[in-house]
Amino acid sequence: MKHILLPTVILFLLTRWTTAGAQSAPAQPQTVAPSRPQKGIVYPPGHPQTPEPPYPYHSDSVEYDNADKTVHFGATLTYPETGGPFAAAILITGSGTQDRDETIFSHHPFAVIADYLTRHGYAVLRVDDRGAGLSTGDVKKATTAVFAEDVETSFAWLKERKEIDPRKIGLIGHSEGGMIAPMVAAENADIAFIISLAGPFSGDSTTMYQVEAALRQYHTPTPLAQYTLATERIVLENVKIADDTAALLKGIDRDYRAYYATIPDSIRSKDLALQPTPDNFVHSIAPKVLPAFVPWWKFYIAYNATPYYSKVKCPVLLVGGAKDIQVDNATDIPRLAAILKTHGNKKVETHLMPDLNHLFQHCTACTVAEYSKLDETFSPEVLSIMVTWLDKEIRK
Protein backbone atom coordinates (compact mmCIF):
# COMPACT_ATOMS: atom_id res chain seq x y z
CA MET A 1 0.00 0.00 0.00
CA LYS A 2 0.97 3.52 -0.54
CA HIS A 3 1.49 4.30 3.14
CA ILE A 4 3.23 1.09 4.15
CA LEU A 5 6.99 1.50 4.14
CA LEU A 6 8.20 -1.63 5.87
CA PRO A 7 11.91 -1.15 6.55
CA THR A 8 14.42 -3.36 4.78
CA VAL A 9 16.16 -4.95 7.74
CA ILE A 10 12.97 -5.70 9.67
CA LEU A 11 11.57 -7.62 6.71
CA PHE A 12 14.77 -9.60 6.40
CA LEU A 13 15.17 -10.41 10.09
CA LEU A 14 11.54 -11.17 10.90
CA THR A 15 11.37 -13.55 7.96
CA ARG A 16 14.49 -15.32 9.17
CA TRP A 17 13.30 -15.32 12.78
CA THR A 18 9.91 -16.88 12.10
CA THR A 19 11.33 -19.47 9.71
CA ALA A 20 14.09 -20.32 12.19
CA GLY A 21 11.50 -21.67 14.59
CA ALA A 22 10.88 -18.74 16.92
CA GLN A 23 7.48 -18.57 18.60
CA SER A 24 4.94 -16.87 16.37
CA ALA A 25 3.03 -13.86 17.59
CA PRO A 26 -0.41 -14.56 19.02
CA ALA A 27 -3.28 -14.15 16.60
CA GLN A 28 -4.68 -10.65 16.54
CA PRO A 29 -8.28 -10.18 17.72
CA GLN A 30 -10.79 -10.32 14.88
CA THR A 31 -13.24 -7.88 16.45
CA VAL A 32 -13.62 -4.77 14.34
CA ALA A 33 -14.64 -1.29 15.33
CA PRO A 34 -18.22 -0.36 14.44
CA SER A 35 -18.65 1.96 11.50
CA ARG A 36 -19.73 5.51 12.31
CA PRO A 37 -21.75 6.88 9.39
CA GLN A 38 -22.19 10.61 8.92
CA LYS A 39 -25.52 12.00 10.03
CA GLY A 40 -28.13 12.60 7.37
CA ILE A 41 -26.37 10.61 4.62
CA VAL A 42 -27.44 7.17 3.41
CA TYR A 43 -24.52 4.87 2.53
CA PRO A 44 -24.39 1.66 0.50
CA PRO A 45 -23.62 -1.63 2.31
CA GLY A 46 -20.03 -2.83 2.71
CA HIS A 47 -17.95 0.26 3.25
CA PRO A 48 -20.88 2.49 4.17
CA GLN A 49 -19.08 5.81 3.75
CA THR A 50 -18.24 5.29 0.08
CA PRO A 51 -20.24 7.92 -1.83
CA GLU A 52 -22.42 6.80 -4.72
CA PRO A 53 -24.22 8.85 -7.37
CA PRO A 54 -26.36 10.75 -7.81
CA TYR A 55 -24.35 13.36 -5.90
CA PRO A 56 -25.91 16.58 -4.57
CA TYR A 57 -23.02 18.52 -6.14
CA HIS A 58 -21.06 18.79 -9.38
CA SER A 59 -18.50 16.03 -10.00
CA ASP A 60 -16.40 16.72 -13.09
CA SER A 61 -13.77 14.44 -14.60
CA VAL A 62 -10.96 16.73 -15.71
CA GLU A 63 -7.57 16.39 -17.40
CA TYR A 64 -4.61 18.76 -17.73
CA ASP A 65 -0.86 18.79 -18.40
CA ASN A 66 2.18 20.15 -16.61
CA ALA A 67 3.93 23.18 -18.09
CA ASP A 68 6.28 21.29 -20.43
CA LYS A 69 3.64 18.69 -21.43
CA THR A 70 5.70 15.78 -20.09
CA VAL A 71 3.04 14.67 -17.60
CA HIS A 72 -0.70 14.38 -18.19
CA PHE A 73 -3.01 14.31 -15.17
CA GLY A 74 -6.47 12.83 -14.70
CA ALA A 75 -8.54 14.11 -11.79
CA THR A 76 -11.99 14.72 -10.34
CA LEU A 77 -13.16 18.18 -9.32
CA THR A 78 -16.21 18.37 -7.06
CA TYR A 79 -17.94 21.61 -6.09
CA PRO A 80 -21.39 22.70 -4.82
CA GLU A 81 -24.27 23.07 -7.26
CA THR A 82 -24.93 26.71 -6.39
CA GLY A 83 -22.87 29.67 -5.27
CA GLY A 84 -19.20 30.24 -5.75
CA PRO A 85 -16.47 30.94 -6.37
CA PHE A 86 -15.53 28.36 -3.75
CA ALA A 87 -12.63 27.77 -1.40
CA ALA A 88 -10.91 24.60 -2.54
CA ALA A 89 -8.65 21.80 -1.35
CA ILE A 90 -6.19 19.70 -3.35
CA LEU A 91 -5.88 16.19 -1.89
CA ILE A 92 -2.34 14.72 -1.87
CA THR A 93 -1.85 10.98 -1.53
CA GLY A 94 0.79 9.15 0.47
CA SER A 95 3.81 7.12 -0.66
CA GLY A 96 3.56 4.88 -3.71
CA THR A 97 1.42 5.08 -6.83
CA GLN A 98 -2.26 5.63 -6.05
CA ASP A 99 -5.41 6.65 -7.85
CA ARG A 100 -7.37 9.82 -7.15
CA ASP A 101 -9.48 8.10 -4.45
CA GLU A 102 -6.36 6.85 -2.63
CA THR A 103 -7.92 3.39 -2.98
CA ILE A 104 -6.68 0.88 -0.43
CA PHE A 105 -8.18 -2.53 0.44
CA SER A 106 -11.41 -1.49 -1.36
CA HIS A 107 -11.64 1.66 0.77
CA HIS A 108 -11.74 5.04 -1.01
CA PRO A 109 -10.74 7.58 1.65
CA PHE A 110 -10.21 10.53 -0.69
CA ALA A 111 -13.65 10.00 -2.23
CA VAL A 112 -15.10 10.08 1.29
CA ILE A 113 -13.19 13.26 2.21
CA ALA A 114 -14.13 14.99 -1.05
CA ASP A 115 -17.78 14.04 -0.62
CA TYR A 116 -17.94 15.39 2.92
CA LEU A 117 -16.14 18.65 2.18
CA THR A 118 -18.18 19.31 -0.95
CA ARG A 119 -21.44 18.70 0.88
CA HIS A 120 -20.24 21.38 3.29
CA GLY A 121 -19.57 24.00 0.65
CA TYR A 122 -15.97 23.39 -0.48
CA ALA A 123 -14.52 22.42 -3.83
CA VAL A 124 -12.11 19.48 -3.89
CA LEU A 125 -9.59 18.33 -6.50
CA ARG A 126 -8.36 14.77 -6.19
CA VAL A 127 -5.79 13.61 -8.72
CA ASP A 128 -4.43 10.31 -10.02
CA ASP A 129 -0.74 10.04 -9.11
CA ARG A 130 1.64 9.98 -12.05
CA GLY A 131 1.53 6.43 -13.40
CA ALA A 132 -1.94 5.73 -11.96
CA GLY A 133 -5.37 5.98 -13.58
CA LEU A 134 -5.34 8.57 -16.35
CA SER A 135 -2.10 10.21 -15.25
CA THR A 136 1.19 9.61 -17.04
CA GLY A 137 4.81 10.39 -16.20
CA ASP A 138 7.94 8.67 -14.96
CA VAL A 139 7.68 7.14 -11.49
CA LYS A 140 10.89 5.11 -11.19
CA LYS A 141 13.15 8.16 -10.97
CA ALA A 142 10.66 10.40 -9.17
CA THR A 143 11.17 11.65 -5.62
CA THR A 144 8.90 13.41 -3.16
CA ALA A 145 10.22 16.68 -4.60
CA VAL A 146 8.96 15.65 -8.04
CA PHE A 147 5.55 14.83 -6.58
CA ALA A 148 5.54 18.31 -5.03
CA GLU A 149 6.00 19.72 -8.53
CA ASP A 150 2.96 17.71 -9.62
CA VAL A 151 0.92 19.35 -6.87
CA GLU A 152 2.13 22.76 -8.03
CA THR A 153 0.79 21.90 -11.50
CA SER A 154 -2.59 21.05 -10.00
CA PHE A 155 -2.58 24.27 -8.00
CA ALA A 156 -1.83 26.38 -11.08
CA TRP A 157 -4.59 24.65 -13.04
CA LEU A 158 -7.15 25.03 -10.23
CA LYS A 159 -6.47 28.75 -9.88
CA GLU A 160 -7.78 29.27 -13.42
CA ARG A 161 -11.14 27.60 -12.84
CA LYS A 162 -14.01 30.07 -12.69
CA GLU A 163 -15.72 28.03 -9.96
CA ILE A 164 -12.75 28.48 -7.60
CA ASP A 165 -11.65 31.41 -5.45
CA PRO A 166 -7.90 31.54 -6.26
CA ARG A 167 -7.19 33.22 -2.90
CA LYS A 168 -8.60 30.25 -0.96
CA ILE A 169 -6.92 27.15 -2.34
CA GLY A 170 -5.20 24.89 0.17
CA LEU A 171 -3.66 21.44 0.51
CA ILE A 172 -4.78 18.32 2.37
CA GLY A 173 -2.03 15.71 2.49
CA HIS A 174 -2.09 12.20 3.94
CA SER A 175 1.12 10.46 5.07
CA GLU A 176 3.74 11.38 2.44
CA GLY A 177 1.17 13.88 1.20
CA GLY A 178 1.62 15.54 4.57
CA MET A 179 5.31 15.93 3.70
CA ILE A 180 4.54 17.33 0.27
CA ALA A 181 2.07 19.98 1.46
CA PRO A 182 4.63 22.09 3.39
CA MET A 183 7.16 21.65 0.58
CA VAL A 184 4.70 23.29 -1.81
CA ALA A 185 3.50 25.95 0.64
CA ALA A 186 7.07 26.90 1.59
CA GLU A 187 7.66 28.03 -1.99
CA ASN A 188 4.22 29.48 -2.69
CA ALA A 189 2.70 32.14 -0.46
CA ASP A 190 -0.61 31.80 -2.33
CA ILE A 191 -1.37 28.48 -0.63
CA ALA A 192 -4.23 29.37 1.72
CA PHE A 193 -4.02 26.48 4.20
CA ILE A 194 -2.57 23.07 4.99
CA ILE A 195 -4.28 20.10 6.59
CA SER A 196 -1.71 17.43 7.40
CA LEU A 197 -3.15 13.96 8.05
CA ALA A 198 -0.44 11.82 9.68
CA GLY A 199 2.31 13.81 8.01
CA PRO A 200 5.71 12.74 9.41
CA PHE A 201 8.45 14.93 10.84
CA SER A 202 11.20 13.00 9.08
CA GLY A 203 11.64 9.92 6.93
CA ASP A 204 14.45 8.66 9.13
CA SER A 205 12.56 8.76 12.42
CA THR A 206 9.39 7.41 10.81
CA THR A 207 11.23 4.38 9.45
CA MET A 208 12.72 3.62 12.86
CA TYR A 209 9.28 4.01 14.43
CA GLN A 210 7.91 1.44 11.97
CA VAL A 211 10.71 -0.96 12.89
CA GLU A 212 9.94 -0.60 16.59
CA ALA A 213 6.20 -1.12 15.97
CA ALA A 214 6.86 -4.30 13.97
CA LEU A 215 9.18 -5.63 16.65
CA ARG A 216 6.49 -5.09 19.27
CA GLN A 217 3.84 -6.71 17.10
CA TYR A 218 5.95 -9.84 16.64
CA HIS A 219 6.96 -9.95 20.33
CA THR A 220 10.60 -9.98 19.28
CA PRO A 221 13.06 -11.00 22.04
CA THR A 222 15.01 -8.04 23.41
CA PRO A 223 18.47 -9.01 22.12
CA LEU A 224 17.15 -9.49 18.59
CA ALA A 225 15.14 -6.28 18.80
CA GLN A 226 18.25 -4.33 19.80
CA TYR A 227 20.22 -5.95 17.00
CA THR A 228 17.50 -5.16 14.47
CA LEU A 229 17.32 -1.50 15.45
CA ALA A 230 21.09 -1.16 15.24
CA THR A 231 21.33 -2.77 11.80
CA GLU A 232 18.40 -0.76 10.45
CA ARG A 233 20.17 2.40 11.62
CA ILE A 234 23.33 1.29 9.80
CA VAL A 235 21.39 0.86 6.57
CA LEU A 236 19.58 4.20 6.86
CA GLU A 237 22.69 6.21 7.60
CA ASN A 238 24.43 4.77 4.58
CA VAL A 239 21.42 5.31 2.32
CA LYS A 240 21.65 9.00 3.19
CA ILE A 241 25.29 9.40 2.14
CA ALA A 242 25.88 6.81 -0.59
CA ASP A 243 26.01 8.00 -4.20
CA ASP A 244 25.71 4.53 -5.72
CA THR A 245 25.10 0.92 -4.77
CA ALA A 246 28.81 0.10 -4.47
CA ALA A 247 29.29 2.91 -1.95
CA LEU A 248 26.14 1.82 -0.13
CA LEU A 249 27.29 -1.77 0.34
CA LYS A 250 30.82 -0.69 1.25
CA GLY A 251 29.51 1.64 3.95
CA ILE A 252 27.12 -0.96 5.34
CA ASP A 253 29.91 -3.53 5.45
CA ARG A 254 32.25 -1.11 7.27
CA ASP A 255 29.67 -0.04 9.85
CA TYR A 256 28.33 -3.54 10.44
CA ARG A 257 31.81 -4.88 11.15
CA ALA A 258 32.33 -2.12 13.71
CA TYR A 259 28.95 -2.81 15.31
CA TYR A 260 29.36 -6.60 15.33
CA ALA A 261 32.56 -6.28 17.30
CA THR A 262 30.60 -4.60 20.11
CA ILE A 263 28.02 -7.40 20.53
CA PRO A 264 28.73 -9.27 23.79
CA ASP A 265 29.43 -12.97 23.39
CA SER A 266 26.68 -13.69 25.91
CA ILE A 267 23.93 -12.46 23.57
CA ARG A 268 25.53 -13.09 20.18
CA SER A 269 23.30 -15.54 18.41
CA LYS A 270 24.74 -18.83 17.21
CA ASP A 271 22.16 -18.79 14.42
CA LEU A 272 23.87 -16.96 11.58
CA ALA A 273 20.49 -16.41 9.91
CA LEU A 274 19.65 -14.04 12.75
CA GLN A 275 23.01 -12.39 13.28
CA PRO A 276 25.18 -12.98 10.21
CA THR A 277 28.93 -12.65 10.63
CA PRO A 278 30.54 -9.56 9.06
CA ASP A 279 31.65 -11.68 6.10
CA ASN A 280 28.04 -12.72 5.42
CA PHE A 281 25.96 -9.70 6.39
CA VAL A 282 26.19 -7.59 3.23
CA HIS A 283 25.63 -10.67 1.06
CA SER A 284 22.50 -11.56 3.03
CA ILE A 285 21.03 -8.05 3.13
CA ALA A 286 21.89 -6.93 -0.41
CA PRO A 287 18.86 -8.57 -2.10
CA LYS A 288 16.60 -6.47 0.14
CA VAL A 289 18.57 -3.25 0.10
CA LEU A 290 19.61 -2.87 -3.53
CA PRO A 291 16.13 -2.97 -5.14
CA ALA A 292 15.01 -0.31 -2.66
CA PHE A 293 17.98 1.99 -3.33
CA VAL A 294 16.08 4.32 -5.64
CA PRO A 295 15.96 8.14 -5.71
CA TRP A 296 12.65 8.19 -3.86
CA TRP A 297 13.98 6.21 -0.87
CA LYS A 298 17.13 8.29 -0.62
CA PHE A 299 15.12 11.52 -0.59
CA TYR A 300 12.58 10.11 1.87
CA ILE A 301 15.17 8.97 4.41
CA ALA A 302 16.88 12.38 4.32
CA TYR A 303 13.61 14.34 4.56
CA ASN A 304 13.15 16.64 7.53
CA ALA A 305 10.14 18.96 7.83
CA THR A 306 12.00 21.84 9.49
CA PRO A 307 13.25 23.67 6.35
CA TYR A 308 9.74 23.62 4.92
CA TYR A 309 7.46 24.33 7.88
CA SER A 310 9.78 27.10 9.01
CA LYS A 311 8.69 29.01 5.86
CA VAL A 312 4.95 28.23 6.04
CA LYS A 313 2.83 31.21 7.07
CA CYS A 314 -0.68 29.99 6.21
CA PRO A 315 -3.03 28.34 8.75
CA VAL A 316 -2.10 24.70 9.47
CA LEU A 317 -4.19 21.88 10.92
CA LEU A 318 -2.17 18.86 12.13
CA VAL A 319 -4.14 15.66 12.78
CA GLY A 320 -3.00 12.12 13.52
CA GLY A 321 -4.16 8.89 15.10
CA ALA A 322 -2.80 7.77 18.45
CA LYS A 323 -2.90 4.12 17.28
CA ASP A 324 -0.99 4.78 14.06
CA ILE A 325 1.86 2.24 13.74
CA GLN A 326 3.33 3.90 10.64
CA VAL A 327 3.77 7.50 11.79
CA ASP A 328 4.57 8.53 15.38
CA ASN A 329 1.90 11.22 15.61
CA ALA A 330 2.23 11.61 19.37
CA THR A 331 5.80 12.81 18.83
CA ASP A 332 5.62 14.35 15.36
CA ILE A 333 2.55 16.58 15.76
CA PRO A 334 4.10 18.57 18.65
CA ARG A 335 7.38 18.75 16.73
CA LEU A 336 5.73 20.17 13.63
CA ALA A 337 3.64 22.61 15.65
CA ALA A 338 6.75 23.82 17.46
CA ILE A 339 8.54 24.50 14.16
CA LEU A 340 5.63 26.60 12.93
CA LYS A 341 5.26 28.56 16.16
CA THR A 342 8.98 29.11 16.60
CA HIS A 343 9.05 30.75 13.18
CA GLY A 344 6.12 33.04 13.89
CA ASN A 345 3.13 31.06 12.62
CA LYS A 346 0.56 31.04 15.42
CA LYS A 347 -2.29 29.80 13.21
CA VAL A 348 -1.74 26.17 14.18
CA GLU A 349 -4.27 23.68 15.50
CA THR A 350 -3.44 20.11 16.51
CA HIS A 351 -5.46 16.97 17.21
CA LEU A 352 -4.12 13.59 18.35
CA MET A 353 -7.11 11.29 17.90
CA PRO A 354 -7.49 8.28 20.22
CA ASP A 355 -8.29 4.88 18.71
CA LEU A 356 -7.46 5.88 15.11
CA ASN A 357 -4.95 4.09 12.88
CA HIS A 358 -2.89 5.43 9.97
CA LEU A 359 -5.93 5.44 7.68
CA PHE A 360 -7.98 7.31 10.30
CA GLN A 361 -10.18 4.31 11.01
CA HIS A 362 -11.34 3.44 14.52
CA CYS A 363 -9.36 0.28 15.16
CA THR A 364 -9.21 -2.59 17.62
CA ALA A 365 -6.04 -4.55 16.82
CA CYS A 366 -4.66 -1.44 15.08
CA THR A 367 -2.43 -3.42 12.72
CA VAL A 368 -1.95 -3.08 8.98
CA ALA A 369 -3.73 -6.41 8.52
CA GLU A 370 -6.84 -4.97 10.15
CA TYR A 371 -7.26 -2.13 7.64
CA SER A 372 -9.27 -4.27 5.22
CA LYS A 373 -11.46 -5.76 7.96
CA LEU A 374 -12.90 -2.45 9.12
CA ASP A 375 -16.14 -1.15 7.63
CA GLU A 376 -15.23 2.43 8.43
CA THR A 377 -13.17 4.21 5.77
CA PHE A 378 -12.41 7.51 7.49
CA SER A 379 -13.26 8.87 10.93
CA PRO A 380 -16.36 11.11 10.89
CA GLU A 381 -14.86 12.97 13.86
CA VAL A 382 -11.86 13.99 11.77
CA LEU A 383 -14.08 14.97 8.85
CA SER A 384 -15.99 17.24 11.23
CA ILE A 385 -12.77 18.69 12.65
CA MET A 386 -11.58 19.56 9.15
CA VAL A 387 -14.80 21.35 8.16
CA THR A 388 -15.08 23.20 11.47
CA TRP A 389 -11.47 24.38 11.13
CA LEU A 390 -11.93 25.38 7.47
CA ASP A 391 -15.07 27.34 8.32
CA LYS A 392 -13.13 29.20 11.00
CA GLU A 393 -9.90 29.84 9.09
CA ILE A 394 -10.86 29.99 5.42
CA ARG A 395 -14.54 30.72 4.93
CA LYS A 396 -14.55 33.70 7.30
Image (cartoon, rainbow, N blue to C red):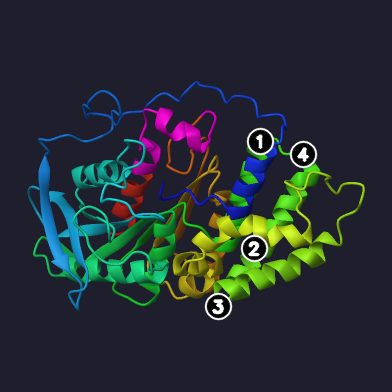
Residue type, numbered disc 1: Thr
Are the two marked residues, 1 and 2, in contact with CB atoms closer than 8 angstroms?
Answer: no
Camera-side residue of 45 and 72: 72
Q: Earlier in the sequence, mark 1 or mark 2?
A: 1
Is 378 included in the stretch rendered in magenta? yes
Cα separation, mark 1 vs mark 4, equals: 15 Å
From this viewpoint, is residue 362 visible? no
Report the side of 76 relative to 346 (left or right): left
**Label 3 belongs to which residue?**
243
Residue 121 is situated, as x and y percent measured from the top left of the image, at 19, 49
Residue 374, by quadrant, is top left
**Label 1 belongs to which residue?**
19
Report the side of 205 relative to 3 (left or right): right
Are the two marked residues, 3 and 4, in contact with CB atoms closer than 8 angstroms?
Answer: no
As helix, strand or loop, the secondary structure at mark 3 comes to: loop
Cα separation, mark 4 vs mark 2, equals: 21 Å
Camera-side residue of 26 and 351: 26
Magenta residues? 364-384
